[in-house]
Amino acid sequence: MASEIWGERWASSTSDIARRYMEVASRKQSLVCLAADRRTMAGLFELIDSVGPYLAALKTHVDLVDDWTPESWSDFCEKARDADLLIFEDRKFADIGKISRDQMAGVYDIRSWSDLVTAHLISGPDIVDGLQSGWDDVGRSGGVLLLAQMSSRGNLLNPNYTDEVVAKGKSHPGVFGFIGNGSSPEELIELRLKVGSEKLIWTPGVNLVVGDGEMGQRYGHPRDAVLAGSDCIIVGSGIHRSDNPTESAKEYAQSSWNALLERES
Amino acid sequence: MASEIWGERWASSTSDIARRYMEVASRKQSLVCLAADRRTMAGLFELIDSVGPYLAALKTHVDLVDDWTPESWSDFCEKARDADLLIFEDRKFADIGKISRDQMAGVYDIRSWSDLVTAHLISGPDIVDGLQSGWDDVGRSGGVLLLAQMSSRGNLLNPNYTDEVVAKGKSHPGVFGFIGNGSSPEELIELRLKVGSEKLIWTPGVNLVVGDGEMGQRYGHPRDAVLAGSDCIIVGSGIHRSDNPTESAKEYAQSSWNALLERES
C-alpha cells in the first residue's frame, strides 16, 4: 500500500528506515511529526495518549526534560513504539565525527532509542559517519536528517550552503533526508529540485494558522509544504498549545495526508 | 598584572568573563584549555589531578560521559574551581534561541556550572540571547564562543560564513569570542583582522607535533597560533595521550605563555 501511495519516493528509496517511515505514515494516514517540546516526563506521556494515533513520528529534545530518568525515558520510548511512532531526536549534532559518535552515548544514550536524529553539516560530512557509528556501536540502525534550510530569523543557511549540504548528503546512505523550510513553499520547491526524488524532506515551521511565532519562528501551511515536496510536517504549538490537541492533530493528519494523495495522484 | 600582559585585549574588553579568563591565564602563566574528552568520571578527575596546575580552562563534553551522575559532576566542577580553572562546555549549541535556552537546563543543567559554551551561529543570532537567558534563569553569567572557523575535513565554514559570524557576533555583549582554526596561522591572522582587538579567539587544532589526527582533524603549532592572534589554545590528545601528561601540559603552557609575551611585547 505504501508503495502505491508514495510513488517515485518509494520506488527510488534505498533506505530501510525511509521505507519504514513511509509505511508508518501510510498505516496512520498522517505525515505529522509532533515536536514534543515538553520539559516534564508527565507532559510527554500525555502527548502520546492524546495525539499518538494521529502521528507518524515524535520529535524529542531529550536534553530539555528536567525530570528525565533512564527508566521513565525507556517507558516513554516503549509507549511511542506501541503507538507505532518513529522516535526522532532533534539533537542538531554539529561536532566532528569522532565526538558526535560519542555524543550518541553518554547518559541519554541517544543511539539506543532514536530512529532519526538531526545534524548540521557545518563541521563536515564525517559527522554522518560518526552518527552511524554510534548506532552501529549498539547494533541498531537509524537515519540522519541534515539541516538544509531553516526559517529562523537571521539563519546562515543561504542557497549556497543548502547546495553544499544537498550535494554532500544526497548520495550518502546514512542520510535519511533533509530538513527544509516549511514556512516557504518557494524555497521547498527549490530544495526538492536539488534533492531529487530519493531522499525525504521533513519540514518544521508549519501551522494551520500561518504567521509569526516566538523568538524568530515563522509558519507556513501544511498543505502547501507537502505539495511543494515535503514528506513530513513537523508540528509543535499548532497541536500541543491548541484548545483541543486531539482534534488539532487529526486536522494536521488529514491536511498532510490529503496533500500527499493530491501530490502523488 | 593581567592588564599589563594582555595589552589592548584587556584594555578594550567589556566583558567580565573575558577579563576573568585573562586573569586566570596570567595567574597560571598558561593559555591552555584542556579538551577533557574522557568518557568516565574517574578519567576526568585524573586529568585535573595530573595537569590542572598548567591549565587556564577545562573543555568538557558532559554528554559523552557514560557514568555521569549529578553528584559526581558537581564534585568535578568544584575540583575544577579549586584548581582555578574556567569550565567550558563544548556543546556546539545549534538550535533556535528558545530551544537553546531550554537545552541549558535538563538533566545536565549546563547553565548551572559552565562559564563558557560553544555555539554555531547557523540557526541565527537569537541563539546567543537564548543561551544568555539560560544563565540568567539561574542567576549566573557566562560567555558564548561562536564557531567562526574549523579545521575538520570538508567543513562549511568558508570565509563568507566566517564574515557573517564575526559581523553578527563582534558587537554582541553575550559573545565572549570566537573559535578559530588553530591549524592555520594564515586563517587565524585573517580572523583576527576581522574580529578586531576586543573579543577573544580560542583555537583547537594545535599540537606541539603537527600533522593529521583521527577522523579529519589536523594540527598546527601552539606558538604559531598565539602569534597569529589566538588567546587560548585548546589541546586534547597532545596532553592526555602523551606518555607524560604533566610534562606535556607544562610544555604547552610555556609555549603558549611565551608566545603571548612575545606577541604583546
Image (tube, coloured by chain):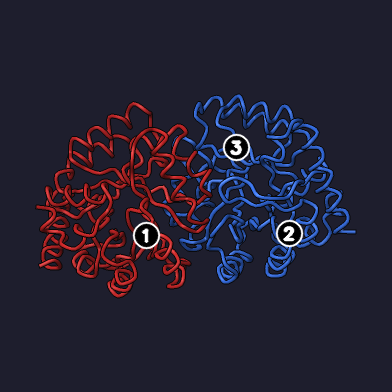
Chain colours: A blue, B red
Label 1: chain letter: B
User: Which residue is disc 1 drawn over?
Assistant: B171
Disc 3 packing (10 Å; few <14; some 14–19; many ≥20): many
Residue at the location (31% across, 35% down)? B41
Residue B43 screen position, x and y as percent: 28, 39
Q: How far apart are the two marked residues, 3 and 1, measured between alpha carbons? A: 32 Å
User: Which residue is disc 2 drawn over?
Assistant: A13
Residue at the location (74% across, 56% down)? A230
Check disc 1 and report its element: helix, strand or loop.
Answer: loop
What is the three-letter code of the residue carrying label 1?
Ser
Check if mark 2's residue and mark 1's residue have beta carbons within 8 Å.
Answer: no
Residue A120 screen position, x and y as percent: 53, 57
What is the three-letter code of the residue carrying label 3?
Asp
The part of the image, by quadrant, that contains residue B164 is: bottom left
Residue at the location (64% across, 58% down)? A178
User: Which residue is disc 3 drawn over?
Assistant: A37
Check disc 3 and report its element: helix, strand or loop.
Answer: loop
Disc 2 packing (10 Å; few <14; some 14–19; many ≥20): some
